[in-house]
Image (cartoon, rainbow, N blue to C red):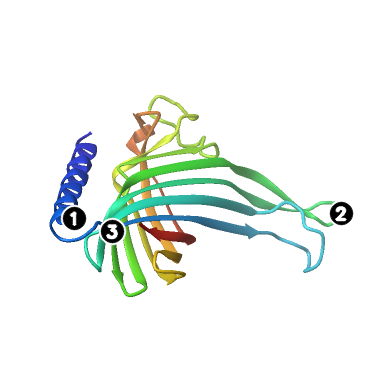
Amino acid sequence: MKILHSTAIIVFVTATLASAQTESESPSLWRLEGGITFRHFQQQVKAEVGQPRGDRLVNEFELGALVSGLYELNEYIAVGAFLRVDRGERLAARFDGFDTDGTTKTRDAVGGLYSELWLGPFVQVRWKQLSLDLGYAPVGIRDDMARTDVPSSTGDTDAAFSLHPTIAWVVSLGANVPLSESLDVILKAEYRPRYYSKRGGEPLVGNIEHGTQSIAPLIGIGWRF
């Protein structure tokens, strides 16, 4: 709650300063950005290249959507807030030889669907067409059906994970390709480190922390109005 309170104060002060600058100097410059991210990774074993495929050792696919709104303080710095959602499926297994048809068998498979939601403030620094974003998610949950091996302290294996209060960041580096005076194509590489410390509102068993990180491309559109 302290983090949410602090975030609200920061957003309020920023909006107040932006409003004062708008009234005294020039019209406001608001910008809306939207984009998608995707990741796909596979591993497999075959007796030789070209043989029929059996079970995959690793198969992961994720699709995400990002929407952000920001206010341009000046030519180089903008502040705003973002909403990020992801949906994916992950499977990992161990190689267990070949069946009578010569296709791969696996064992000890672990996997399932997962979804994630992030909400928080961010700062964007720009130079010409290049941009660097730093965002923080005080609000974030992850519903992961594959992680039944990480229960809460009360034994819950179905509830969603909650983000760690300080380790929930997103860093993006990329460029804007102008289409018109108000419309850009956005191309970025995104890095997200995060930890989860609770499940269903309760600490994880043994007070452990479940961490993950990802790197993904982002393609989108920016609109200034």
Q: Earlier in the sequence, mark 2 or mark 3?
A: 3
- Please name whichever residue, 140 or 152, is drawn nearer the observer in this view of the structure: 140
Secondary structure category for the residue under label 2: loop
Disc marking residue 191: none
**Type of the residue with mark 3:** Leu
Q: Residues within 10 Å of mark 2 (few under 14, many from 20)?
A: few
Q: Which x, y percent locates residue 187?
A: 46, 66
Q: Which residue is mark 2?
A: 101
Secondary structure category for the residue under label 1: helix
Q: Which residue is mark 3?
A: 29
Q: Which x, y percent locates residue 22?
A: 18, 55
Q: Residue furthest top?
A: 154
Above/below status of 211 relative to 33: above
Q: Are marks 3 and 1 in contact (CB under 8 Å)?
A: no
Distance from Cα at disc 2 to Cα at disc 1: 71 Å
Q: Residue at x 40, y 24 (%)?
A: 154
Distance from Cα at disc 3 to Cα at disc 1: 9 Å
